[in-house]
Every structure is written in structure tokens, then in C-alpha cells.
Image (cartoon, rainbow, N blue to C red):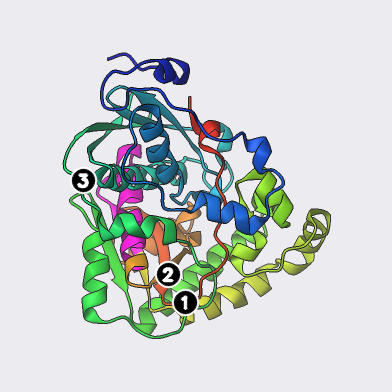
Amino acid sequence: MNRLTRRQLLAATPGVLGGAAGFGASPLAWAAESYEAAAARIWRTGPLQGLSGAALGQELVRYATLAPSSHNTQCWKFALDGQGITILPDLSRRCPVVDPDDHHLFVSLGCAAENLVQAAQALGLAGEVRFDAARDAVVVRLSPTPAVITPLFKAIPERQSTRGEYDGKPLSTQDLALLERAGSSERVRLLLLTGKTAIDQVLDFVVQGNTAQLNDKAFVKELKSWIRFSASDAVERGDGLFAKSSGNPAVPSWLGKLMFDFVVTAGSENEKYTRQLRSSAGVAVFVAAQEDKAHWVDVGRAFERFALQGTVMGVRNAHVNMPVELATLRPRFASALGLGAMRPDLVVRFGRGPTLPASLRRPVQAVLV
């Protein structure tokens, strides 16, 4: 079936996602919301019955957009048709300095695909995921199935990347086994590092990578462009890294940009990451079987299952990807982990810790094509 445009979808009724429905309030109506109201609206649990047609497609896309993305760029677009949903890369939101080969971008598409599959199952649809290399797109075909509300689905509105210190307590063997099962697949290997020596080894690479990045003016400029220092700026933009979501105070944007260069230094950030890693129960390293876009999508799906399973158990996580973001550092990191020529894809610390303000998302209308 040919892909329908959004306008055609609203007027048509074929297939799984056929039917007509409105697309909610205008983003302009949300511009004056408080941050708390915006977060509550975005991270709500939606209705699980009575949806069909475009309203069903909209709700699936909404759940997909609750996935994490690098710098919360939300580097995705969604196309609805009568048979499913296609997730496309939004290259206007790529980060060429920290992510020159778009690795993180395609991992982010995988995270969105996993959320979509989990939400589809809860709404009575089975999702079959494949990567379309010709379009660099993730195609999720949907077909009717009995609805199953899984713990991972319930965790979607609760999941967050918690960039604070954790409680320093180890996880049980049973908890680690659940995380390993969720974050592994035939195409993705998960290494769970929980010993002090192993965590300190990762910390050494994090410090090396962080120092190099914060001494790179292009990296700092790109990072700063995605930070939302004030609540009003975060609500207006609906993307990026809100200061309070990282445990920092919210300040006027002009002041935050001025203070950033004085406060965010290699030394201060290395001290912060040292505290954070040493407060963590462990570090998870995700490794794809092959180094290509299709496998990067698989890594994203595996990581999102890991994050959702952790949420079910009250376990938080945060990325410390510096050792894999620098091409000069990554081979040495791989060698230290005993991976040989394989590429480590993600480095994630995990443990039990506080809940921080949720990040925001753009409206569904903004990501539909």
C-alpha cells in the first residue's frame, strides 16, 4: 500500500490505522503552560480503549516520542499509513560534532521503535520491526492482536534519564539478571560491570573523554545549543536538556549561557562524573553484533527495554557515552573491555536514585509527515 500523507490519513479509513480523528490542541495553546503542567500533559498514560484510525496512530506516535534521544533532540519523524508507522531520521536535528556518523541518531530511532511496539501491544496491535536501508527508515508494521498490557508498557510514562547521584547500593543477582535479559538480543550483547575495579576503569575513560570534549570549542557550542536554561524556554521549545532535569537550577537563558562557560569545566564535570559513577550500582555497555545503522537501531531497542525494565524495578540510568563518542578513544575502551575489534555502542550507569523533573517533548503534530 502506498504511504498516505497525514491529510489523506485523516480522510481515509483503510487498514489498521484508517479512520478520521483530530490531532489535539494547537502548540500555541501550550506556550503559556507551566513546566509542571507541560510535563504532566506529555508524560500522561493515555486511554487504552476506544481509539481507532488517526487517533490510534497519534497515540502510538506520542508513546514513541517519550523515548530518549541524544541531547533530547527528538531526531525523528513519523509517517502513518494504513498498515503501520514508519520512523524516519530528522537530519535537521542531528549533532554532527558529538555524533558525526549519526550513530546516536539511529540508536534514538530504535528507542522510539521499542516504545511504539510496547504501546501497540497494549492497544491491541502486534508490531513487526524492520530496517529499510534504502530510506534509512525503521518500518513498524502493525496487525491486530489481543491486547496485552506489559510492565514495560506501564513504565513508559515513568522512565527518565536521571543525571544525579544514586544511592551507592548494589543490585541483587536477580535484578541484574532481569536487566541483562531485557537489554540483550541475538544482535545486541550487554555487558554489566558491577565491581569497583571495573567501574573505576570505565570512570578513567569517561574522564579522558569528558576532558577532550570540554576542551573542544565545537563540542561545547553544540552542547550549549541544546541546553534549556529556563523553564519558559524549555516549554516553548519542547526539546533539549532542561537544566533542572540534570539537577541544576533553572535560570534565565541569558544568564545560563553566560554562566555556562565559567561553571561547566573539565575539572568540575570530571568531579561530578566521579561522584556519580562511584554512587552507581554498575555500568551497562551495549555492543551490537555489527557496525551499521540497522544494528544501531537494535541497540536502541535493547537499551530502551533495559531502561523500562529498570524503571519497573525502581532502577534509574544515565548515559556516560564519552568513551564511545570519541573515535580516538573508542578502540582503547573496546580493548579494555575485551571486545577486540567490536564497537561498544552505549555506556550507561545505573542504580537507585531520586526522581528529577521530566524532560519535555514536541507535539505529535510537529513530528508527523
Q: Secondary structure at mark 3?
A: loop
- Please rate how many residues cluster around mark 3, counting C-alpha atoms within 10 Å: few if below 14, some from 14 to 19, many from 20: some
Asked whether residue 137 is in view, the answer is no
Q: According to the image, label 3 marks what residue? A: 147
Q: According to the image, label 2 marks what residue? A: 316
Between the C-alphas of marks 1 and 2, the distance is 6 Å
Q: According to the image, label 1 marks what residue? A: 353
First in residue order: circle 3 vs circle 2: 3
Q: Amino acid at mark 1?
A: Gly
Q: Residue 73, how many percent across, how many down? A: 56, 45
Q: Which tag is nearer the camera, tag 3 or tag 1?
A: 3
Q: Secondary structure at mark 1?
A: loop
Q: Which residues are magenta?
A: 285-310
Q: Residue 119, how many percent across, how many down? A: 32, 46
Asked whether residue 167 is in view, the answer is yes
Q: With respect to residue 305, does 291 lie above or below?
A: above
Please tell me in which quadrant of the rendered image residue 170 appears: bottom left
Query: Where, quadrant-wise, is the N terminus in this rendering?
Result: top left
- Please rate how many residues cluster around mark 1, counting C-alpha atoms within 10 Å: few if below 14, some from 14 to 19, many from 20: many
